Amino acid sequence: MFEVKEKPRKVERAFLVSVITRKEEEGSAASLLGELSELVENLSISVVAQSIVRTRKTYPGHILGKGKCQEIDEQVKALRCDVIIFDNEITPGQQRNWEELTKVLVIDRHEVILDVFADRAQTKEAVLQVRLARLEYSLPRLRRAWTHLDRQRGGGVTQRGDGEAQIELDQRMLRDKIASTKKEIIQVSGRRNTSRKKRQRIPLATLAIVGYTNAGKSTLLNRITGSSVLSVDKLFATLDPTSRKVKLPGGRTIVLTDTVGFIRKLPHRLIDAFKATLEEALVANLLLHVIDFSCSEFEEHLNTTNEVLEELGAEDKEILTVYNKIDQGDQVMTRLKAKALTPDCIFVSCKTGEGIQELLQIIEERLNKSVVSTKYSIPHQRYDLVAKLREQGCISTEEVTDCGTNIEATPRGKLVSLLEGFLT
């Protein structure tokens, strides 16, 4: 059976390159290279050097002109690097041209992100989604993956190179593998939908935590629910959605779900591949958008997340912006900037617990806004209904009288029909 081959050898020393066409792009390019460097180091590859290369125009063969290419080649050889990583997306042809020139492995940001995702995927669904993304990425790069194949010669249809038939066979096998992986994803997604429907039968509001990678989403889930979801200082530490129940201050129980983080220049094939994982955000009653308050570029992270949510069709969902890590940031100026960007926001520290109780109260207020309270007069002999209302945490007011209990509440599910005979 055809399998996507791993990199031809272990790589240890990386040279990072970002190509820009305008001087004003330098600041953004430096930030993105820093992010790329962290992604690369998460793969246990040392970043030896970084280079921002400015060019008047890009070239189809190598992106850069001949002089710049030779300059980078000399630097790579001098530093004894064994991989060049472009922050820009490069075509399969450009990838091959660079490898022929430098005699080292050449990849781009998208391939790094795919490798990180493949390394972190745990559940069946995440593994399948990563496999699909890698297969689709590899399809136009088969000539690079299979080094035993000869290059195709130029000429007419009858003038075939020695390896062409094998490449065509591999492409067909790869397409079959893509098709079968898509079928498996549909099956797993169907099981996830079944689980979601079972949850929805129990009338609990759902919240999804979204945000830029490494903003503290899993840490927030752990702080609120007391769970122990993996939470480390790494990009894409967790890829799989995790749901936990939590009781709000008023007694109401909700389901809180942690989702995969976003990143700038996220490959579109990954957005499609992980759409099932991010569906939790589409069905949630409220989104908690977590932002790293201590990061100087949180405005760009905010915009990136909003753009991805828009691509997923979740831009119309109600969103509560949560600035995390306030124990690390410049309090006065950063808060002013954050308030200007998102006036209706809250500041918390998942590390110290500051602001968490206030956050839970705001969540409860937001959820209660969309629900209309109903008044009931329940006799003492049906106190079991009062107990069920308390279990749901939906009682606004409660008054015990000689005849029974007068309650104002927002019941959900089957309890609504059970209480119809006690409306006032």
Image (cartoon, helix red, strand yellow):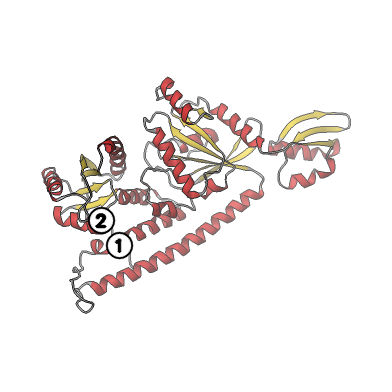
At x 21%, y 48%, the residue is 84
Front-lying residue, 94 or 409: 94
Crowding near pointer 1: few (<14 within 10 Å), some, many (20+)? some
Instruction: Report the disc number at residue 7.
Output: 2
Instruction: Report the disc number at residue 70.
Output: none
**Picture quarter with the N terminus:** bottom left
How far across and down, in percent of the image, does residue 80 sit?
13, 45
For label 1, the SS is: helix
- Image position of 62 with respect to 3: above or below: above
Q: Quadrant of residue 365?
A: top right
Crowding near pointer 2: few (<14 within 10 Å), some, many (20+)? few
At x 44%, y 44%, the residue is 307
In the picture as drawn, the residue positioned furthest to the right comes out as 403
The first of marks 2 and 1 along the sequence is 2
For label 2, the SS is: loop
Front: mark 2 or 1: 1
Q: Quadrant of residue 214?
A: top left
Q: Quadrant of residue 416?
A: top right
Q: What residue does disc 1 label?
A: 140
- Image position of 280 with respect to 324: above or below: below
Front-lying residue, 20 or 248: 20
**Which residue type does callout 1 highlight?**
Pro
* Residue 231 visible in the current orientation: no
